[in-house]
Image (cartoon, rainbow, N blue to C red):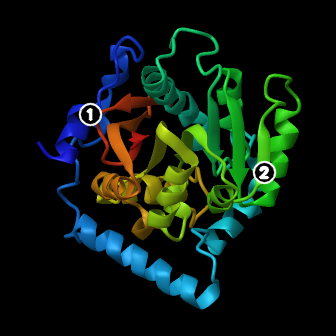
Amino acid sequence: MNQMQRILSARRLSHSIIPQSCFLHRRWFSTSETDASSPPLSSPHQKIQTLEDKASNKSRSTASTTSSLNEQELAKFSAIADTWWHAEGPFKPLHLMNPTRLAFIRSTLCRHFSKDPSSARPFEGLRLIDVGCGGGLLSEPLARMGATVTGIDAVDKNVKIARLHADMDPMTATIEYQCTTAEKLVDDGRTFDAVLALEVIEHVANPAEFCKSLSALTIPNGATVVSTINRSMRAYASAIIAAEYILQWLPKGTHEWSSFLTPEELTMILQRASVDVKEMAGFVYNPITGRWLLSDDISVNFIAYGTKKE
C-alpha cells in the first residue's frame, strides 16, 4: 500500500469527535480524487520541480536570502486587511469555515498529543503557531482552547488588526503576534508543538521551501496541519468562478488556479520536508444550511495533518 493509499484510507475522523452527520452532504461535490473533466495535468513530481525551479530563478534574481513570500499576494491581503473581522466582508468564507477547520484540528491534535477532546481547554500546555494568521480568526479560538499561541503574518496591517482584536478579550490578549515570516523564525531557532498554516500555501512563491520552514518550526514528533485548495476543474469552478465572480464572496483575483496543489503534491512536498501526512479530510459547503462540513471529498478544499519525523 503506497503513501497516498494509506492517507486516503485514514481520512475519516474519529466519530466520537465528529458526528456522523458531518458526512451526509457529499452529493453536491464529486467524491473522486481528481475531477474526470480536468485536462491532463503534469505529474506531482513535475509540478513540484516546476514550482521549485521558478522560485529558485526568482530568488537568484531578487534576493540572496531564501524566502517563500509572494509580494503580489501580500499586496492583495494588505488592501483588505481592515475587513478581517467583518463577518459579511471578503473573509466571509473563512468565518463560515472556521468551526469546521477547528473540528479537524481539535480531533487530530487531541489524538496526537493524548488530550481530552471534550475538555473546554484541550490544548493546555501546547505551544502552537498560526503561520499566515491574518487577522487572527484561527489564533483566537486556539488560545481559548488553552494553547500558548504565536501568530505570524508578513502583512503588517494584518498583525495590527489581529493584535487590536485579541486585546479586547483577556483570554486572547496573551497571543504573541509578530509581523515576520516562518523562515525568519527558523533562523531565530523557534520551535512549536504544532504548526498550522491554513489557506496560506496557495499564496506563497515557493511551496516546497515554505513546507521546509513549517517542518523546521515543528518539534520532532510534533504536528503540522496545512489546508489549501485542490488544483482541479471543480475547484476552479467553485473557488474562483463561483466564489469570486458569481457569489462575490472574495475579491476578484484572490486565487490563481495554477498556484493550487493537489493532495498528492502536498503530501509529497511535506514528505520531502520530513513531515509524514497521517490524515486528510475535505471541506464541503452545504448551500441549504450555509455551513461547511467535514467530508472525505477532497476535490476542492482539503486539510492535511502530519507528524514531524524524529
Q: Quadrant of the N terminus?
A: top left
- Name the residue nearer the viewer: 286 or 268: 268
Q: Which mark is residue 223?
A: none
Rendered position, 119 above or below 114:
above
| Left or right: residue 194 compared with residue 305 | right
How crowded is the residue under tag 2: few (<14 C-alpha within 10 Å), some, or many (20+)?
many
Q: Position of residue 146 (x, y in %)?
A: 68, 21
Which of the 4 image quadrants contains residue 176? top right
**Residue type marked 2:** Gln
Label 2: which secondary element: strand
Rendered position, 114 above or below 100:
above
Rendered position, 88 above or below 213:
above
- Of all residues shown, which one is farthest toward the bottom? 61
Q: Which residue is mark 2?
A: 178
| Left or right: residue 8 compared with residue 82 | left
Instruction: Identify the residue shown where x is 55% and y is 27%.
Output: 99
- Name the residue nearer the viewer: 88 or 179: 179
Instruction: Identify the residue shown where x is 32% and y is 37%.
Output: 278
**Residue type marked 1:** Arg
Which of the 4 image quadrants contains residue 10? top left
Q: Which mark is residue 27?
A: 1
